[in-house]
Image (spheres, rainbow, N blue to C red):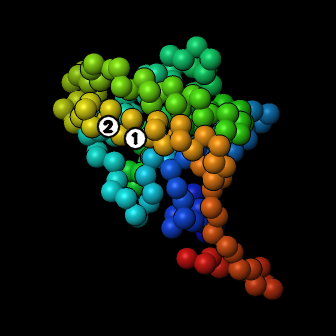
Amino acid sequence: MELIQSFSVDHTRIIPGIFKSRVDRMGCESVTTYDIRLKRPNREPVIDVAAMHSLEHIIATYLRNDPDWKDEVVYWGPMGCLTGFYLILKGERAPQELHGLMLGAFRYVDGVTEVPGATAVNCGRYLMHDLEMAKWYAREFTDYLEANAENGDIFEYPRTERLVTEKGQSFFDS
């Protein structure tokens, strides 16, 4: 079986940032999956589950209401490893083009007074939210994005090295 693209990223070297994970073509259309990474995998504590759930609700609401981006948004949701989110957009853009959008989305969290859709009718785990912790993580990430706006490393995945034998068999460095 082929190793999926997200497993070819060197998780020992990845830093928080905005990365292009993959592009899928569907006829003449394409959708791009972006890795919005808030934490260093395996080196920092993961995002608290209740805070992550709140960030999912708040930022999904923000993205789907942003007049410049709402028609491009396909999906916003958490990574299983709890170190960030996936954003899927129609088309294909460089990760740098999402910097302002992500800054706006994470800044927006600070002004929210209640988590949208956090009711028994609207949410499958409506009691599992932590707005104050969500605000803390959002401020931490916005400060980081602002401080690193000119750092190209926050837009470029570190890839694992592949050793390919003469017979075409691939091996990975990790």
Q: Which amino acid does label 1 sit on?
A: Glu
In the rendered image, which quarter contains the C terminus? Answer: bottom right
The answer to whether residue 122 of the structure is visible from this angle is no
Q: Quadrant of residue 87?
A: top right
107 vs 71, nearest the viewer: 107
Q: Name the residue under label 1.
A: 140
Q: Which residue is drawn at 51% across and 25% down?
A: 104
Q: Which residue is drawn at 65% across and 43% down?
A: 150
Q: Residue furthest top?
A: 67
Q: Does 2 sit left or right of 111 as displayed?
A: right
Q: Residues within 10 Å of mark 1 (few under 14, many from 20)?
A: few
Where does residue 21 sit, x and y in percent of width and height?
Answer: 62, 49
Q: Which residue is drawn at 67% across and 33% down?
A: 97
78 vs 157, nearest the viewer: 157
45 vs 65, nearest the viewer: 45
As measured in the structure, the alpha-carbon distance from the residue carrying label 1 to the one carrying label 2 is: 6 Å
Where does residue 2 sit, x and y in percent of width and height?
Answer: 63, 66
In the rendered image, which quarter contains the N terminus? Answer: bottom right
Q: Which residue lies furthest to the left in this view?
A: 127
Q: What residue type is labelled 2?
A: Trp
Q: Mark 2 points at which residue?
A: 136
- Classify mark 1: helix, strand or loop: helix
Callout 1 touching callout 2 (CB < 8 Å): yes
The answer to whether residue 136 of the structure is visible from this angle is yes
